[in-house]
Amino acid sequence: MIKNQIINSHPKLTKFLVDQYLSDTNIKKACEIFSKNTEPIFDEYLSKFNIYCLIKDNKKEEAQLILDLKKELGFKDKYFEKKINYLLEYTDKIDDEISEKSIFDFYLAHQTNPNFKFEPNDKTKKIIWKYLSSANLLNSFKETDTSELDKIATIEKAVHNQNYPEKDLLELYKRFQFNINQLLNVKDAYKTLPNIEARALIYQKILLESEIVEKLKFLKILKESFENDGLANAFDTELKMFLKGIKPTEIPDNLTSFYYTNIKIEKNLDKKIKINNDIIHQSKLINYFNGDYAKSKIEKDTNNLLKKIQKNKKYFLSKKDVILIESLKYDGIEISEKYDDLYKIDENEIPTDIQIMINNEETGLALLRIAEVIGQDRIERIDEDTIYFIVTTLNQLNIDRIRNQILLQVLPLKV
C-alpha cells in the first residue's frame, strides 16, 4: 500500500510530521497518518506512536497484539509500557515519571497523569516548550513571583530562544515594585540592581517616558542589557514596535545608528527579485506571495496585465505563468472569465494517489508524497510540470505558507 511505503521509506519525515502535530497538540492529524495502516511499521518510534493511536481509536485489542508481537521480538521500553498499560486500563496506578527524550514520551506523561505538572528549564527542548504553550501548560510562568529571579532568568532565555512570548516577559517586568526615587533616577538606579531587576526598572521607565529622545535612550540601554547577557532576541519584536512609532525625523544623530539597526526588518525574498512586468510570473504580481498586495489591488493589476497579454499575439503563456494565475484563483482572487481561453488545465497532471489523498483530506500523507517526489533535489532544479502539480496540491490543501515559499523560489527572475 502507498501509505505504508511512504511511512516506511520516509521514517524521518514521518516522524517530523508526527512531532510537529504533537507539538501543536493536534493528535487527530498526527494519528491520521496511520489511520489506514495494515502492515508492520519498521521504525520503532513510529510503531510505538501507531500503538498509541490505535488505543485512542478504541482499537485496544489490536494495539495489545502489536505490542505483544514487538515484545516477543525483543522490544523493551519500561517507560512506554507503563504509560500504555495505564491507557489500556490494566492498571490505575499513575506513573508520574516524565521523560523529555522525545516529544512523544513527554506527551504520554501528560496524557497519563491527571495531575501533570512540569516546569521547563534552560535544557528543555524547543519542541517541548512549543507543546507546553499549545497545551496551556505555561500558566505557572504567568504567575511567577518577581522574587523568583532564577525562574525569571529561565523565562528570559526562553524568550531569547523564541519559546516564550516577549509580551509575557514584559508584562512580568511591569509587576516589579520600585520606589519613586528609583523611577526618577533610573540612569543611576538600574546600575545598582541585579540585571533582571534593572531591565524591569528600565522597561517601566520606557512606558512612563513621554519625551521621544529620552525614550530612545532607555530603549537603547535595555537592548544593550539583553545583548550583554547573551539574550539579544529577548527584546526584538517589541523593540521594533516601539521604534515604528517614532518618526525618523525625531531621531537625534547620536541615536541614528541604534534606530536604523534595530528597526530593520529581516531581508525578504523580494529584495533579490528583479521585476519584469512584460512576463506574468516575473511581474510585480509575485509580490502578492510576500503579503505585499491588498486583494482589491491584486485583482485589478492581474486583470490589467492579462488584458495587456491578451492583446500581444506573440506572447505565449508559460507553465510558470499558469502556476501564478491558478494560485491567485485558489486564493479567491477574481479574474475575468474573458481570459479563460488564454490557457487550458489538464486535470490529469496530478498523480492519482495524491489526488485521492487530497480528496480524503489526508494532508500529512500528501506532504509525505510530495517530499518523496522532490527527493534530494533542489526545488529550483525540478521541472515545471512537477512544480505545477506540487503547487496545485498545496493550493487544494490550503497550505499557503509552504506554497508561497516555493513560488518565491521558482517563479521570479532573481539577481
Image (spheres, rainbow, N blue to C red):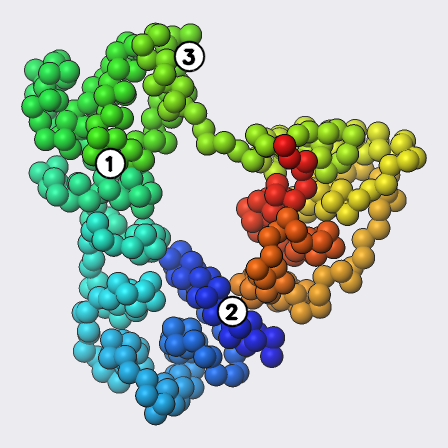
Give me the C-alpha separation between circle 1 and circle 2. Answer: 38 Å
Q: What percent of the width, then of the height, locates residue 115? A: 20, 64
User: Mark number for residue 230?
Assistant: 1
Nearest to the observer: residue 331 or residue 74:
74
86 with respect to 304 (left or right): left
Q: How many marks?
A: 3
Q: Earlier in the sequence, mark 1 or mark 2?
A: 2
Which circle, 3 or 2, is nearer the viewer? 2
76 with respect to 300 (left or right): left
Q: Secondary structure at mark 3?
A: loop
Give me the C-alpha separation between circle 3 and circle 2. Answer: 52 Å
Residue 191 in sight in this render? yes
Quarter holding residue 170: top left
Q: Residues within 10 Å of mark 2 (few under 14, many from 20)?
A: some
Q: Residues within 10 Å of mark 3 (few under 14, many from 20)?
A: few
Q: Residue under circle 3?
A: 247
Where 271 falls versus 37 (above or below)?
A: above
What amino acid is at disc 1?
Gly
Q: Residue under circle 2?
A: 10
Q: At x 25% / y 31%, what residue is drawn?
A: 227
Which circle, 1 or 3, is nearer the viewer? 1
Q: Are marks 3 and 2 in contact (CB under 8 Å)?
A: no
What amino acid is at disc 2?
His
Quarter holding residue 336: top right
Q: Residues within 10 Å of mark 1 (few under 14, many from 20)?
A: few
